[in-house]
Image (tube, grey):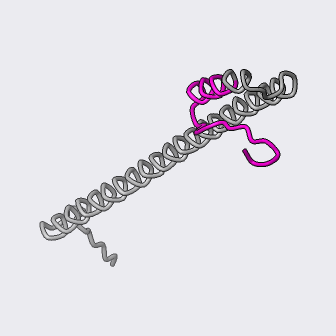
């Protein structure tokens, strides 16, 4: 005698509801994980963009400082050459004062230009 049992392939209502609850829970967990991953990626992109912006600002400030120093250096070389060639006599002092005042107005970042003699005058 052969004993053959047939099992029903149909799920009971309790098993079906447990499976459905498990599936919904899995979908919810996956949605939360996907949202967390997306938020992390967005945060990383914002940090990278901020790094690029700060780098650009630093480069611009560096270039501005370099340009200001170059202008000041050129102006000082020009004034030194004029003083060496023309000297500092009374009528030259007025011209040099006017020239120095114009250079200070023209170059941003320079507070003043002065010529001192050996005695500090």
Q: Position of residue 76 (x, y in %)?
A: 76, 32
Residue 68 percent location from the top left of the image: 65, 34
The quadrant of the image that shows the N terminus is bottom left
Of residues 52 and 57, the one drawn nearer to the viewer in this rendering:
57
Where the C terminus falls, by quadrant?
top right
In the image, taking residue 54 as reference, residue 84 lies left or right, namely: right
Rendered position, 79 above or below 62: above
Which sits in the foreground, 121 or 25?
121
Q: Quadrant of residue 111?
A: top right
Tell me if residue 69 is in the magenta stretch.
no
Query: In the image, what residue occupies the spot 52% across and 41% down?
Result: 53
Q: Residue at x 64, y 38 (%)?
A: 65
The image shows a total of numbered marks equal to 0
Looking at this view, is 10 or 109 the one in front? 109
> Which image quarter: residue 94?
top right
Q: Residue at x 28, y 57 (%)?
A: 27
Q: Is residue 115 magenta?
A: yes
Which residue is at 78% across, 25% downward? 78
Q: Position of residue 67 (x, y in %)?
A: 67, 31
In magenta, the rendered stretch is: 96-121
Can you say whether 52 is above or below 73 in the image? below
Q: Quick one: which residue is furthest to the left in this view? A: 13
Outermost residue toward the right in this view: 85
Q: Is residue 4 above or below residue 99?
A: below
Residue 18 coordinates in the image, percent (x, y): 19, 68
Q: Is residue 75 left or right of residue 4?
A: right
Q: Is residue 4 left or right of residue 95?
A: left
Nearer to me, 17 or 39: 39
């Amino acid at each position: 005698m052969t004993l053959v049992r047939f099992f029903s392939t149909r799920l009971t209502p309790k098993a079906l509801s447990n499976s459905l609850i498990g599936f919904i829970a899995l979908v919810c967990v996956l949605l939360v994980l996907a949202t967390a991953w997306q938020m992390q990626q967005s945060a990383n992109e914002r940090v990278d963009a901020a790094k690029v912006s700060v780098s650009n600002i630093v480069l611009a400030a560096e270039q501005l400082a370099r340009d200001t120093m170059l202008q000041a250096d050129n102006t000082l070389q020009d004034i030194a050459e004029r003083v060496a060639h023309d000297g500092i006599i009374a009528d030259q002092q007025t011209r040099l004062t006017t020239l120095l005042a114009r250079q200070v107005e023209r170059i941003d970042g320079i507070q003043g230009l002065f010529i001192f003699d050996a005695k500090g005058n």
